[in-house]
Amino acid sequence: MSVNEIKEKVVKEVEVVKEKQIICDECKKIIRSIKSTDNLFGLKNRIEWYSVTTGHYDWGNDSEDSIEHMDICPDCIEKVFNYFMKRSKGDNTEYIHINHEYGYEYEKVGF
């Protein structure tokens, strides 16, 4: 029994992430940028930002809809926090969670 295989080259189009950016949701400044071509061995500068989650615990389905996740740069965190405090006035079920995040820029290392 002989089998004849007919082959064909197929090109599949895929999306690849060329660059990942963390952008401040307040001032729209790029906080951190990582390109797929960056060499991950040469750590350079420490970069800091805040991951902020706000929402409320009021009764009803809108509690889940009230949840907001934001990335905030160090220059804007005080402004965001003060705005939240003025808006909430401490007499309702609003909450704010602030997590300090950090990462590093990568140094270009050639071979």
Image (tube, rainbow, N blue to C red):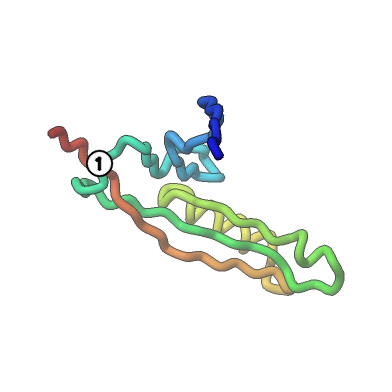
Q: Looking at the rendering, in which quadrant would you find the N terminus?
A: top right
From the viewer's side, name the closer residue of 108 and 16. 16
Q: Residue at x 56, y 58 (%)?
A: 82
Q: Position of residue 109 (x, y in %)?
A: 17, 37
Q: Position of residue 98 (x, y in %)?
A: 51, 65
Establish if 94 lies above or below 50.
Answer: below
State the residue position of label 1. Answer: 39
Q: Residue at x 45, y 41 (%)?
A: 21
Amino acid type indicated by mark 1: Asn
Residue 47 shows up from this direction: yes
102 to the left or right of 45:
right
Quadrant of the image occupied by residue 19: top left
Q: Residue at x 41, y 52 (%)?
A: 74
67 to the left or right of 35:
right
Q: Position of residue 41 (x, y in %)?
A: 20, 48
Quadrant of the image occupied by residue 31: top left
From the viewer's side, name the closer residue of 107 and 83. 107
Q: Looking at the rendering, in which quadrant would you find the C terminus?
A: top left
Q: Position of residue 64 (x, y in %)?
A: 76, 65
How packed mark 1 is, by other alpha carbons closer than 10 Å (few <14, some 14-19, many 20 or more), is some
Establish if 60 lies above or below 69.
Answer: below
Circle 1: element type = loop
